[in-house]
Image (tube, rainbow, N blue to C red):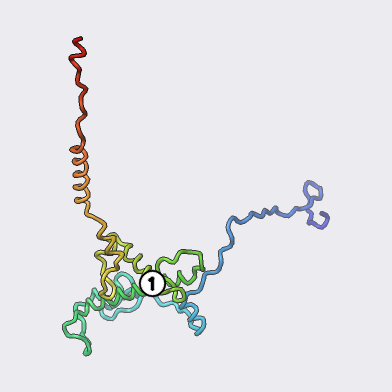
Amino acid sequence: MFQLPTEMNDYVAVSVLPKPTFRLPREKKIPSSKELTKWDKFARLKGIQNRKKSRKVWDPVSESWKPRWGKDRVDDVKDKWVLEVPDNADPYEDQFAKLSQAKKERRAKNELQRLRNIARTVKAGQAPPIGVLTESQSSKAELSRALSIAQNSDASMGRFSTPLDSRKLSKNVEKQSKKRIPLSQFVQNTKKSKQNKILARKPKKKNRMNRKSVNK
């Protein structure tokens, strides 16, 4: 108490108390550090530094600055009205469709890598093995199960989705798609069943009066 600083207040020496503190307990635990992705581990091992690229680049065709990616980006396929056919390519092949297909494959590859990074950070027993699995846990049966789940994820249950590598749809998808019937057929079957129930009902027998017993 006597070691605290003092000040004069109305000609009286008053000790200056420290500011009150309150320790509020934390509801949840401190978040752990984020797991490194496969690329982050490789970059740290090789000493690769992430250098930020500029948002816009110079387009010599339009002589203006355009975004590097996104809408109205530089070197966009939509802005090209003609494409050069390589010497080793089929002259009758559609180069625009080829570029579009390559773009879809890059998107699918990035999504696959993202799911693998998530699956790599999941500990054993933390989540059910549904979707994309890591290389250490994947097997033929598990991959087939993940493929079947992915094919069943759309509205048509994989009936109208493009098969991978021109393969046939899995047997599970074929069975489930055959079980489903159109809505019009379902309504028609419901009406028929109701009509059959009505026709199957037998009229109740009326209690007839015994006239002989009444006249007696």
- Residues 190 and 120: in front is 190
Across and down, in percent, residue 140 comes to 39, 74
Residue displayed at 82% across by 58% down = 3
Residue displayed at 26% across by 56% down = 180
Residue 139 in which image quadrant: bottom left
Left or right of 31: which side holds 196?
left
- Residues 203 and 195: in front is 203
- Residues 57 and 77: in front is 77
| Vertical comparison of 185 with 115: above or below | above
Q: Quadrant of the N terminus?
A: bottom right
Residue 196 in which image quadrant: top left
Across and down, in percent, residue 38 comes to 46, 77
Across and down, in percent, residue 67 comes to 34, 73
Residue 55 in which image quadrant: bottom left
Q: Amino acid at mark 1?
A: Leu
Q: What residue is pinned by disc 1?
A: 143
Residue displayed at 83% across by 55% down = 2
Left or right of 26: which side holds 161?
left
Left or right of 72: which side holds 134?
right
Name the element at disc 1.
helix
Q: Quadrant of the C terminus?
A: top left
